Image (tube, rainbow, N blue to C red):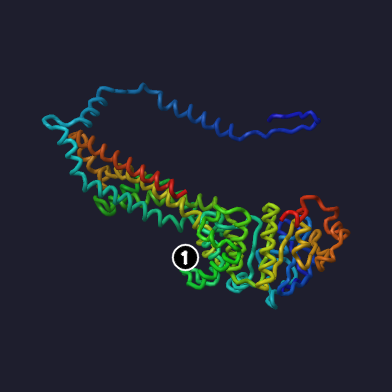
Amino acid sequence: MIKFINVAKTYPNGVEALKNVNLEIKDGEFVAIIGLSGAGKSTLLRLINKMIESTGGQIFIDDVEVSSLTGVKLRMLRRNIGMIFQSFNLVKRTSVYNNVLAGRVAYHSTFKTIFGLFPKEDKLIALEAIETLGILDKAFIRADQLSGGQQQRVALARALAQKPKIILADEPVASLDPITTIYVMDDFKRINRDFGITVVANMHHVDLALKYATRIIGIKAGEIVYDGPADKVSDDMLVHIYGRSLKSDELLGDIDEAI
Amino acid sequence: MKQFNLPSGAVIKKPFNKIWIVLGTLLVLVLFFSLFIFSRRPFFNLSVLGEILVKMFTPRQYQNWGDYFGYMLTLRGPLVETLSMAFGGTIIGSIIAIPVAVLSAKNITKIKWIRIPVRTFLNLYRTIPVMLLAILAVYLVGIGVLPGLMAITGFSFGIMAKMLFEIIETVDMSPYEALESTGATKTQAFVRAILPQVFPVYISYLIYIFEINVRASAIFGYFGAGGLGTVIVESAGQYYERVGATVILMLGVVLIIQFISNYARGKLQ
């Protein structure tokens, strides 16, 4: 469970990214956060695993207050939270397997990691994660040899290898083509359903968010203006969240036709 | 500053290109220094140069080409000395360079009062001429391969630390962020996300520095650092053909190393 109580974030340059945010996300939910760029979507996501520090309020994950955590305790928290990035954030010149194995390092001492000593079960966890994403035949190929969609799958496998309870995804499909986008979103859906992992994703394409997520959080200028089921989001509400009608690049287009 | 007036009435100014300042400064410096070089009439004596070259690259009187090239075979010992001090020095210097480079890299060492002193030390250290390192080493431990090894270690450390911290500063930091998000320590994130990017370039520079060091070790021979350099110093002025044979041997070795190093560095990209 993720819980925000009166959370605020003001950046050192004075930008108020989030104001008085309250929300509660239950285990196993698939939540999409939508809103204009600059509305505070990334900030909200990164506060959850303290990649950014809040400047007000409290954030709880399973009754643990996040903003006061440091050092080992913070790392133990992050270990249970996978993170997916728009630009994949892989080590491009190393193999898929090594990239996924990186999801296991937080389970071991720094000393062991330096010498690349991973127990056999970790190697199997990594390979199983790669298999789950359907790219086992690519396991020992350099990451930069793969297509964008495949690279994002590697990133997903790395997150899965952490054996996380939550996966945070920051614009996971924004740099992918429409067809690959569908495949990667299907992977998210499957991981959410089969492993019961909570997924919180920032989405640029609104129609995609409505199709895949069970719950939508709409942010406007750092405040939550909609929080409810995906099928209850009306066109008027979207206009309210975006302050205008949607632009064509904010829609993926006919999803079923894209496949 | 150049101004463009577009048909639409819009006006845009092209900013001044700073490259002209750099080029202008260079030109002034070239003119300034050339005053000092050409102010005196140069003293060239081509006939002496020719004489020495002939002495160097032909057998001595009453000797034949068999003797000339046979002498090269007797240089195996000094050759192994040169190669081993160049190799050993490159490896040791490059390893010591790693922590210093990490501590100097802006994107890894965020704490200023660690980074700035380390970087200042590195910059000061690099102002020490390599010759001075060699002379100091000979004073410290006497004549032989050991001072050569020490001088080359010091020299390799200086170049490698500088090059390595610049490589580290240009790596893609996004996997580092990803590793931190998995709960990895900073060291773990560095080892898993930064090192794989840096390692091939590091090895490539290491081979290149080795190549430089084989040549540099000949110069260190002047200060009694052993190897082929010492052979050249001891023969110069008297046995020109020995100097010539040694130089040919060194050229051959450097050429082979260059060939191998180009091949290996190509493979690493």
Q: Label 1 amino acid?
A: Ile
Query: Percent x, y for residue A154?
Result: 59, 61
Evaluate whether residue B116 shows in this view: no
Residue nearer the viewer, B263 or B17 = B263
- Say above or below: B153 vs B45: below
| Left/right of residue A204 with respect to residue A129 in the rendered view | right
| Image point (32%, 42%), residue name | B256
- Residue at the extreme right: A236
- Chain letter of mark 1 equals A
| Left/right of residue A165 with respect to residue B104 in the rendered view | right
| Left/right of residue A55 with respect to residue B195 in the rendered view | right
| Left/right of residue A151 with respect to residue A38 in the rendered view | left
Helix, strand or loop status at disc 1: helix
Residue nearer the viewer, A152 or A139 = A139
Residue B65 position by quadrant: top left
- Read off the residue under disc 1: A114
Query: Percent x, y for residue B169?
Result: 54, 52
Q: What quarter of the picture does the N terminus of chain B occupy? A: top right
Query: Percent x, y for residue A83?
Result: 64, 64
Residue nearer the viewer, B198 or B168 = B198
- Say above or below: A204 vs B261: below
- Residue at the extreme bottom: A63
Evaluate whether residue A76 shows in this view: yes
Query: Percent x, y for residue B259?
Result: 36, 42
Residue B241 position by quadrant: top left
| Image point (69%, 33%), residue name | B14
| Image point (28%, 50%), residue name | B138
